[in-house]
Amino acid sequence: MTKRRYKISQLTLSLCLAIGLISAVNGQTPQPTPKKEPAPATPKREMPPKPMSVPIPVGPRAMPPQGERVTTEKSIMVAPDVSIKLCVLEGKLKINGWERDEVRLFVKEGSRAGIKVLEKGGESGKPVWLLVSNMSRPGAGRGQFSDCIYGETVEMDVPMKASLTVSGRTTHTTVDSVKKIIIQNVEGNIALRNIPGGISATTYQGDVSVENSSGAISLESAEGNVIAFEVNPGQIGDLFKAKTNSGAISLQRVEHRQIEANSISGSLLFNGKFLSGGLYRFKTSAGSIRMLLPADSLCTVKASYGYGVLSSELPLKIITQNVTSGGKNVVGTIGEGDAAAGATVNLTTVSGRIGIGKQP
């Protein structure tokens, strides 16, 4: 049986060789299949950078183009309570309030800036809503950054009753004597003063400072300090809020009845007075809390701290005190009289000390 299989295999091999030889003689040698030219590669489409959680220009598209550096000056008559929208990619931004019903714009060594009227008042016919925009590339498509201007310095004079909405990328901003402002900045310090109608200010790399202002106030920095001096509410219930991830918070003569101050890694300082019925919350994860209060203060103190101590130069009457695995919790009162009629103060630190001092 084995020999028979062997003979059959030899026969099969011989038959294959014979067929190949006949094909070669007849000129029918099989030709290799021609290789197909590869199709041209589809160019890879570059995806635009993902936008941040806030409408602030970032990424390569936000960088000002080279070669477009001019000096621009514009002015326009407006209503005294005009609203102005402005976006600045880079530069030193300075906005001042004045007594004229006029907006003046000055841009040094930057984009060609223009002032667009978005709405006019019904009776006066004067502009009540303006947009400061980039005019360097007329006819360009409207994109996320098409309206943003830039320059070595950007200066504006606006009516004192004006309200502003400002966004920026890399700017150092100073605003003085306007009614109200909302400002968001990626990088750079923000300094605000003499603003009576409320403030919302956010920067991601820089300090935020407010002086001699009022209304509902919200100040936030991701990497920087927050400073407030001589601020008060515009109406009952206005909230003062300060927050930083990496920096200190300093509040002096802040007279809001509701204050929230939170620092993840930094110290908190409050130098002022607690008003009757006020609600105050001061919290830091890694830092100390220091309160400087008048001698006649009346408040209930609720302190929670982990690794640290609680001390008070003012008489602190302890009501409850307990120790847990997370630290110590102390409730006490300061001052003579009905503590319920005073303020409620919450002080929390995970790693740091809490000190209550007496104002000189």
Image (spheres, grey):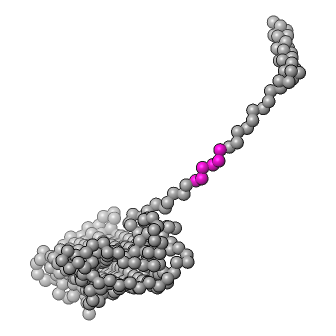
Image point (52%, 78%), residue name? 68
Pick whichever, 173 or 43, lies toward us: 43
Question: Which secondary structure class fits the magenta region best?
Answer: loop
Image point (49%, 60%), residue name? 48
Image point (12%, 77%), residue name? 341
Q: Please say whether residue 43 is one of the residues in the magenta stretch.
A: yes
Q: Please say whether residue 127 is one of the residues in the magenta stretch.
A: no
Using the rendered image of the protein, determine whether residue 321 is visible from the camera's viewpoint: yes
Pick whichever, 2 or 165, lies toward us: 165
Tell me where residue 345 appears, x and y as whole percent.
Answer: 22, 75
Instruction: State whether residue 293 is above or below residue 47.
Output: below
Q: Would you identify the image quadrant in which residue 290 lies? A: bottom left
Tell me where residue 186 appears, x and y as whole percent.
Answer: 43, 73
Tell me where residue 107 appears, x and y as whole percent.
Answer: 44, 83
Instruction: State whether residue 28 is above or below residue 209.
Output: above
Could you tell me which quadrant the N terminus lies in?
Answer: top right
Count of labels in the image: 0
Q: Which residues are magenta?
A: 39-44
